[in-house]
Image: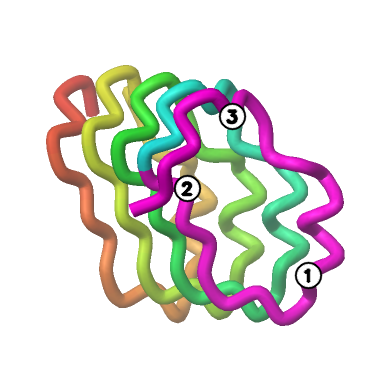
């Protein structure tokens, strides 16, 4: 598990990582917003956002992640809905939503 308690935002330069397969931001409880540019990461296969309780939503650009197979969300206390673009994830195999009480 990542320990990034004080990180409030993800650097926009991450969109240059064309072959990034997995992004683990677990434990980043101060992260305010998930970046919209995430949809540009074409090889992206796994997204771990466990314990990111301050995030309120996933960006609609998540639907552009054609290779994304796994999404792990846990303890997203403020998450109220998933973007409709999540239905565009044709490779998605697992969507784990644990303790997302407002969803």
Q: Residues within 10 Å of mark 3 (few under 14, many from 20)?
A: some
Q: Residues within 10 Å of mark 1 (few under 14, many from 20)?
A: few
What residue appears at the point 30 percent right and 46 percent down from the top-left corner?
A: 73
User: Does residue 67 appear left or right of residue 19 in this picture?
Assistant: left
Residue topped by disc 1: 17
Q: Which mark is residue 25?
A: 2
What residue appears at the point 28 percent right and 60 percent down from the top-left corner?
A: 95
**Does residue 6 show up magenta in the picture?**
yes
**Magenta region:** 1-26
Element assignment for label 2: loop
82 w.r.t. 42: above or below? above
Q: CA distance from mark 3 to mark 2?
A: 10 Å
94 w.r.t. 67: above or below? above
What residue appears at the point 86 percent right and 65 percent down from the top-left corner?
A: 16
**Does residue 64 show up magenta in the picture?**
no
Q: Main secondary structure of the magenta part?
A: loop
Residue 7 appears anywhere in the view: yes
Q: Position of residue 84 (x, y in %)?
A: 47, 45
Q: Earlier in the sequence, mark 2 or mark 1?
A: 1
The residue nearer to you, when weighing 24 against 72, is 24
Q: Position of residue 82 (x, y in %)?
A: 40, 39
Q: Earlier in the sequence, mark 3 or mark 2?
A: 3
Q: CA distance from mark 3 to mark 1?
A: 19 Å
Residue topped by disc 3: 7
Q: Residues within 10 Å of mark 2 (few under 14, many from 20)?
A: many
Q: Position of residue 83 (x, y in %)?
A: 48, 40
Look at discs 3 and 1 and give the one toward the viewer.
Answer: 3
Element assignment for label 3: loop
């Amino acid at each position: 598990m990542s320990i990034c308690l004080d990180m409030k935002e993800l650097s926009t330069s991450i969109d240059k990582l064309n072959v990034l397969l997995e992004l683990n931001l677990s434990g980043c409880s101060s992260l305010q917003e998930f970046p919209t540019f995430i949809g540009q990461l074409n090889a992206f296969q796994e997204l771990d956002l466990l314990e990111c309780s301050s995030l309120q939503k996933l960006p609609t650009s998540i639907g552009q992640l054609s290779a994304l197979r796994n999404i792990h969300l846990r303890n997203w206390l403020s998450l109220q809905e998933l973007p409709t673009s999540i239905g565009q994830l044709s490779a998605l195999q697992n969507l784990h939503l644990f303790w997302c009480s407002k969803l």
